[in-house]
Image (cartoon, rainbow, N blue to C red):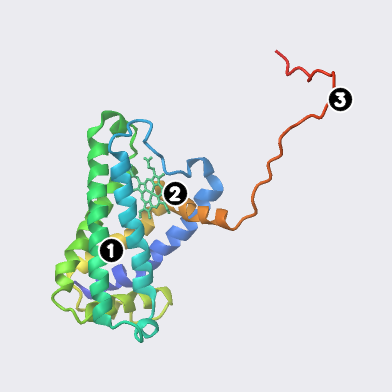
């Protein structure tokens, strides 16, 4: 790939995506809270939604945390416990299982959204685009597994992680880490960043709320008092009107 395109896509684009992700989410939460929802379509047709949605969410939630921890944990922190090669194998197996679950789930969600007339009619363009992006992203992610199997020493994984760590810590030299990465890895990175770019304009904002619900574990419980009237004997309760 030409050098300037590499520099744009993997040196500058990540920051554009992250800025739009954080600022866009903040502005939408501030201005349009009534549009902030997962836009459930369960009332239109539940059918295979339970299987499709659960498979998809189990897969992507695992992959989300797997990528977060796997990419952003500095090598020296896990080196004493697990070698790069073993970590790569762990990522390939666990990510492979989660990827297949997510891929089956998203394929079912896509089929449902496109084939059911009522769901199709009430879908926004972004609902459909989003599912196609996840479909392609999961397929690309799964396609990296046989490629990684060709170098089991973890060297490519270390380079990709170094790219991610240099980006989030604003260090130079990130783009150079991807010099030997093939198009499957690069397209996977590009689409992954694009998810952050479109995030605030789609139903994906529900992910903030999904994680936000964890706050319920820590907040003080709600006090609910019954509205009991202790009236002296012989008095009727006041009428509640007609
Ligand atoms: C944080 C925890 C999460 C919770 C509690 C959650 C919850 C939900 C709910 C309730 C729905 C609506 C399902 C319905 O139609 O009834 C939904 C849909 C969806 N979620 Fe999540 N979600 C979470 C995380 C994620 C993540 C990490 C992703 C992707 C990276 C994601 C992507 C989607 C998509 C694409 C849909 C639409 C599915 C469709 O087309 O019907 N969610 N989610």
Q: Position of residue 127 (x, y in %)?
A: 33, 43
Is disc 1 placed on a helix, strand or loop?
A: helix
Q: Are marks 1 and 2 in contact (CB under 8 Å)?
A: no
Question: Which residue occupies 38% across, 78% down?
Answer: 166
User: Would you identify the image quadrant in which residue 6 lies?
Assistant: bottom left
User: Would you identify the image quadrant in which residue 139 lies?
Assistant: bottom left
In the picture, measured across the screen, residue 119 lies left or right of residue 182, that is: right
Q: Of discs 1 and 2, which sits in the foreground? A: 2
Determine which residue is flagged by label 3. Answer: 232
Q: Are marks 3 and 2 in contact (CB under 8 Å)?
A: no
- In space, the residues marked 3 and 2 are separated at their CA atoms by 51 Å
Determine which residue is flagged by label 1. Answer: 190
In the picture, measured across the screen, residue 21 lies left or right of residue 8, that is: right
Q: Say whether disc 3 or disc 1 marks the residue closer to the N-terminus.
A: 1
Q: Say whether disc 1 or disc 2 marks the residue closer to the N-terminus.
A: 1
Is disc 3 placed on a helix, strand or loop?
A: loop
Q: Mark 2, residues whose alpha carbon is within 10 Å: few (<14), some, or many (≥20)?
A: some
Instruction: Locate the C terminus by quadrant.
Output: top right
- In space, the residues marked 3 and 1 are separated at their CA atoms by 73 Å
Dot label at residue 121: none
User: Would you identify the image quadrant in which residue 114 lies?
Assistant: top left
- In space, the residues marked 1 and 2 are separated at their CA atoms by 22 Å
Q: Are marks 3 and 1 in contact (CB under 8 Å)?
A: no
Determine which residue is flagged by label 2. Answer: 206
Is disc 2 placed on a helix, strand or loop?
A: helix
């Amino acid at each position: 790939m030409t050098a300037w395109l590499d520099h744009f896509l993997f040196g500058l684009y990540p920051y554009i995506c992250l800025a739009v992700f954080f600022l866009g989410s903040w502005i939408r939460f501030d201005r349009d809270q009534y549009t902030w929802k997962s836009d459930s379509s369960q009332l239109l047709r539940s059918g295979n939604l339970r299987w499709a949605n659960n498979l998809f969410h189990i897969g992507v939630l695992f992959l989300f945390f797997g990528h977060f921890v796997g990419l952003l944990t500095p090598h020296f922190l896990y080196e004493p416990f697990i070698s790069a090669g073993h970590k790569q194998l762990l990522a390939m197996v666990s990510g492979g299982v989660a990827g297949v679950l997510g891929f089956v789930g998203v394929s079912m969600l896509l089929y449902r959204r496109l084939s059911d007339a009522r769901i199709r009619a009430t879908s926004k363009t972004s609902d459909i685009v989003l599912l196609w992006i996840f479909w392609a992203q999961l397929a690309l992610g799964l396609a990296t597994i046989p490629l990684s199997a060709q170098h089991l020493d973890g060297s490519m994984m270390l380079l990709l992680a170094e790219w991610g760590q240099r980006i989030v810590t604003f260090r130079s030299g990130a783009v150079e880490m991807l010099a030997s990465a093939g198009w499957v890895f690069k397209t996977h990175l590009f689409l992954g960043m694009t998810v952050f770019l479109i995030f605030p304009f789609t139903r994906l904002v529900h992910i903030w709320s999904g994680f936000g619900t964890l706050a319920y574990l820590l907040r003080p419980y709600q006090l609910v008092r019954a509205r009991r009237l202790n009236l002296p004997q012989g008095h009727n309760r006041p009428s509640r009107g007609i």
